[in-house]
Image: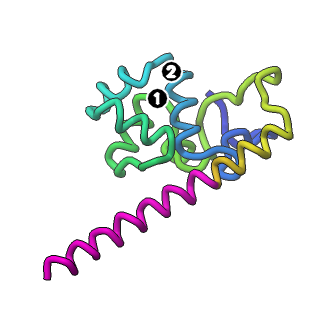
Amino acid sequence: MQDGTDDTDWYSEGTATFGDRLAAARDAAGLKQKDLAQRVGIKTGTLRNWEEDLSEPRANRLSILAGILGVSLSWLLTGEGEGVLAPLEDEVIAPDLSAILTDLRAVRAQMAQAADRVALLEKRLIAMAKS
């Protein structure tokens, strides 16, 4: 474990998502998704959704995750504090690929927001049709 405020800022909010940090901490702990999900008391699909930033855990689950994975709650949420080591130099993504990855993450976040909006509109439409 190391302080997440090192020179690389590999897991900072600007570089990594909550899901990225969760997956990295799980990997560092040597746990499979199924194993961590069982320890937290959730379905594997729920954990997968958290790691893919499709949904987020409630506060009580965040505390459990941080404890099991041996990272601080602050690091898990923001990348600051006690967390896992950054990937080795030879595993670091090339700068041009990093830009693409950043764009993909932004699109994924936009898609998740759009899906939430569609679900809300669908509920409103159903409610209007029933009245």
Q: Quadrant of residue 68?
A: top left
Instruction: Pick whichever of labels 2 and 1 is earlier in the sequence.
Output: 2
Disc 2 marks a residue whose amino acid type is Ala
Q: Secondary structure at mark 1?
A: helix
**Residue assigned mark 1:** 69
**Left or right of residue 57, residue 53 in this image:** right
Q: Main secondary structure of the magenta part?
A: helix
Few, some or many C-alpha atoms within 10 Å of disc 1 (few <14, some 14-19, many ≥20)?
Answer: many
The magenta region covers 107-131
Measured from the top left, where is residue 85 in percent x and y?
67, 28
Q: Secondary structure at mark 2?
A: loop
Extreme residue in the left direction: 131
**Residue assigned mark 2:** 29
**Left or right of residue 24, residue 128 in this image:** left
Extreme residue in the right direction: 95
Give yes or no for contact between labels 2 and 1 (Cβ–Cβ under 8 Å).
Answer: yes
**Left or right of residue 18, residue 80 in this image:** right
Please give the name of the residue rendered at 35% of the width and 34% of the height, measured from the top-left corner. Answer: 45
Measured from the top left, where is residue 27 in percent x and y?
54, 22
Few, some or many C-alpha atoms within 10 Å of disc 2 (few <14, some 14-19, many ≥20)?
Answer: some
